[in-house]
Image (cartoon, helix red, strand yellow):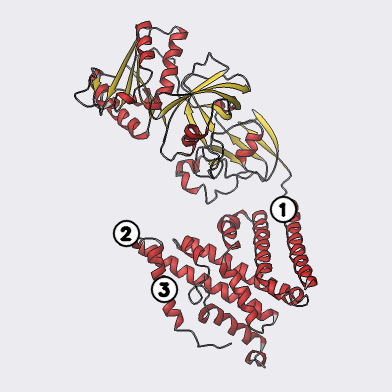
Amino acid sequence: MLAQIAISVGFLLACGLVLAGLLLLAEKKILNYGTCHIDVNSGRKDLAVEGGSSLLSSLAENNIFIPSACGGRGSCAYCKVTVREGGGMIGPVEEPYLSPEERQASVRLACQVKVRRDLRIEIPDELFNVSRFRAKLLHKKPLTHDIVELRMQLLEPGEITFEAGQYVQLESAEYKGRDSVMRGYSISSLPSDRNHLELIIRRVPDGICTTWVFDHLKEGQELNFSGPYGFFHLSDTDAPLIGIAGGSGMAPIWAIVRDMKEKGITHRPATYFFGALTQKDLFFMDEFRQLEKDCPWFTFVPALSKEPDDSGWTGERGLITDVVARRFPDASQHEAYLCGSPGMIDASVAVLRSNGMPEENIFYDKFA
Amino acid sequence: MTPLADMSLLASFALIFVSAAFTDNILLARFLGMCSCLGVSKKVDTSLGLGAAVIFVTACTSALNYLVYQYLLLPLGLDYLRLITFIVVIAAFTQLVEMIIERVSEKLYNSLGIFLPLITVNCAILGISLFMLNKPYSFLQAFAFGLGGGFGWFLAITLIGAIRERINEAALPRGLEGPGITLIIIGIMALGFIGFSGMIKI
């Protein structure tokens, strides 16, 4: 009886060990691609990496951070790069995310391209300035019932250089069986405050990252983010500005307007339309009123769309797009800065264009 | 003496192949390998890919498991461990094949490689390895059984894929969309395949 048990256990053990050993050996021998070279932007950087992992993680190991929200599973399609040589065939995972024009221009998803041989790739120059930061959460302040403000002290690296309007990708930690994910949030603090970073985050029902921020993230805790990303920042023209954003979309506008004040840009009139449902969705009202007092060139227009008629609200009422159309029947000389949901941005772009604004003067960040 | 022993090698090979593919169709007569079938049979080309991978893996693993059973498990008196041993052998084999395909041909890897992890836990593969032990097969006959079983699964999922491609265009009651109508289709097809049963006794 004992001998029987010993034989069966021994057999299973031996079986497992032999097969596992075989697989490990095979992985070493078969999937060994040696050292591969990645040429980034025609000689701007030449990386020597161990072949076998994805282009996205190989670049991250060398401190080039391509934006990615899903962590390399091929579901967000943020990590598009141009692979000139050595990318191999388009895989089944990335196929649905690439348009015919992108295929023509050899665009690929960096997370799905495996480094098997020498590669030649092209990425936007801005991405060279992106780093991964470790920071400590100083405070988490509720602004409304579903929006909080995070303020962080940067630890490693201790300084960040960005332009007002850009965003970072916050990494959520694992909790209750949810994987770590990365989500983009606009920076609401000023570029001159180089050791700190502030974000304004609205709770998304069942959102993986926002649930983590609201329910699990504690003051004093360390967290990671990468950035800065994005092309949303003040243009260097002299055109007057129209800003439209509701809820947490206020973050980049809040940064841009204060940045203008700090830099003494006074010759460009700016109007910010803040759309919200009711009075309990409003925040930073006193701060914006004060800004209006300090800066004669700045006008603040909050507008409520679902406020009961009999409340004491004396400001604008109605959809934010209707308010914008009323105030600026001719917007042909203005530039617009929009931040919010895809629906709100599409509606705003339609209104601005019908009021004469050229499409190239409309800048926006779409956060789905 | 079994009837198989009297036949020429080729004839018994062909007979076992046909019976495993049709009269004993692993998907439609035994209802094994259902989860991956429901998941992948939305389109003909993915069905073809997974089916081809299954043929390859069943044929190889049934031969491999036959050897493991005859020359390791039986001499050691451990035939009650066949289930767990077969699972491990199949899993290791698919992993190994995936690696080799990835290295050898990117094209093949893109069309076939993604299905191999799915197959690792496909009960049809394990089923074929276990069922072949019920019969007094030789090594080549066991291989034919695996090949035929895999082909039967390939045939079934390809047919289901083709039907689903058409039925997806139809206006189905909401409750029947997806797996619901697929299970009904599989049931009707199974009735057809049951008509084959008893035609060949091996």
In the image shown, does A286 or B172 lie closer to the viewer? A286
* Any part of residue A239 in sight: no
- Count of numbered circles in the view: 3
Q: Position of residue B31 (x, y in %)?
A: 49, 72
- Left or right: B175, with B61 as reference point: left
Hey, what amino acid is under mark 3?
Gly
Q: Quadrant of residue B180?
A: bottom left
- Going 56% across and 79% down the picture, which residue do you hit? B20
Q: Are marks 3 and 1 on the same chain?
A: no
B54 or A277: nearer the viewer: A277
- Please, what is the three-letter code of the amino acid marked with disc 1? Glu
Q: State the separation of the CA atoms marked 3 and 2.
A: 19 Å
Q: Secondary structure at mark 3?
A: helix
Give the alpha-carbon distance from disc 2 to disc 1, as whole Å: 46 Å
- Left or right of residue A196: residue B103: right
- With respect to residue A309, does A33 lie above or below? below
Identify the residue at horizontal 51%, vertical 47% (top origin): A94
Point out residue A273 in the picture as x, y percentages from the top left corner: 32, 20
Mark linked to residue B187: 3
* Neighbours of disc 1 within 10 Å: few (<14), some (14-19), many (20+): some
**Residue A126 sits above or below residue A81 on the image:** above
